[in-house]
Image (cartoon, rainbow, N blue to C red):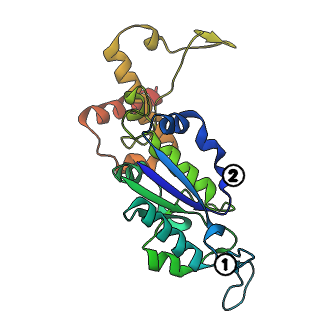
């Protein structure tokens, strides 16, 4: 996968050189290219923003540099990428959307700043607005890094044990189960006996039950959307029975 990122702060993307994303890039499984938006301005001051029409606070990012940057990306890549624009007004980033995006060979992410980006960038370039949550950050750089990091985990060969990706929270609609490692006791807190039993089927059932418990307690909205199996319903009944004791 190739991802081009257009930003006025290329230096903000240093984290992309480390951990899973860094390894994916080193192995040639993921290509990330940074483009400085100021390189696509036409004035000597390299201005990327201006005052908003109609008045109001803040500055709005100009459309022409973004159009020029996307043209430059297309010329260099020899094709048109799927264009994303991090925005609080956008479609919420979910694991399902990430799986959809992971099937793309080429993405471009346009990072806004200041008060926002001229609306003609979205309309003229067909950019898809993507939100990482119901809050506001200073620019599109952090959301872009979230998108790249989350996508990299879904690319074949990036994560050593692909089963760990399949078991992540949201991968199948539910939150993840609790995890434990050595030592068996810390500060008077032990490990659930079932995990020490070596009984694989019992461990599997316990983990599934914990997924259902956590999702019901912390994100019941997810549980309502999930297509539950007969076993899931039995485990939920068991949970309710345990809580009544």
In the picture provided, is 101 more to the left or to the right than 109?
left
Q: Earlier in the sequence, mark 2 or mark 1?
A: 2
Q: Quadrant of residue 82?
A: bottom left
- Give the residue at mark 2: 11
Residue 60 is marked as: 1
**Which residue is nearer to you in this view: 184 or 51?**
51
Q: Quadrant of residue 174?
A: top left
In terms of secondary structure, where does tag 2 sit? helix
The answer to whether residue 10 shows anywhere in this view is yes
Dot 1 crowding, Cα within 10 Å, few <14, some 14–19, many 20+? many
Q: CA distance from mark 2 to mark 1?
A: 22 Å
Task: Give the percent coordinates (x, y) of residue 202.
Answer: 35, 16
Dot 2 crowding, Cα within 10 Å, few <14, some 14–19, many 20+? few
**Which residue is nearer to you in this view: 141 or 206?**
141
In the picture provided, is 177 more to the left or to the right than 203?
right
Task: Give the percent coordinates (x, y) of residue 195.
Answer: 45, 13
The answer to whether residue 83 shows anywhere in this view is no
């Amino acid at each position: 996968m190739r991802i081009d990122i257009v930003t006025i702060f290329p230096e903000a993307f240093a984290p992309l050189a480390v951990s899973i994303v860094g390894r994916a890039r080193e192995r040639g499984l993921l290509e990330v290219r940074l483009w400085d938006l100021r390189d696509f301005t036409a004035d000597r001051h390299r201005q990327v923003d201006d005052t908003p029409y109609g008045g109001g606070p803040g500055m709005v990012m100009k459309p022409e540099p973004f159009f020029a940057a996307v043209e430059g990306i297309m010329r260099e890549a020899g094709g048109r990428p799927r264009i994303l624009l991090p925005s609080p007004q956008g479609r919420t980033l979910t694991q399902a959307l990430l799986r959809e995006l992971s099937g793309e060979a080429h993405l471009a992410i346009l990072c806004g700043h200041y008060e926002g980006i001229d609306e003609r960038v979205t309309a003229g370039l067909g950019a898809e607005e993507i939100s990482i949550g119901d809050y506001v950050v200073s620019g599109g750089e952090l959301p872009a890094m979230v998108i790249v990091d989350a996508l990299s985990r879904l690319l074949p060969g990036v994560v050593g044990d692909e089963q760990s990706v399949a078991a992540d929270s949201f991968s199948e609609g539910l939150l993840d189960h609790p995890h434990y490692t050595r030592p068996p006791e810390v500060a008077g807190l032990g490990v659930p006996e079932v995990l020490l039993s070596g009984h694989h089927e019992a461990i599997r059932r316990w983990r599934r039950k914990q997924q259902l418990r956590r999702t019901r307690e912390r994100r019941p909205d997810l549980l309502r959307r999930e297509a539950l199996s007969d076993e899931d319903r039995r485990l939920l009944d068991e949970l309710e029975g345990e809580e009544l004791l």
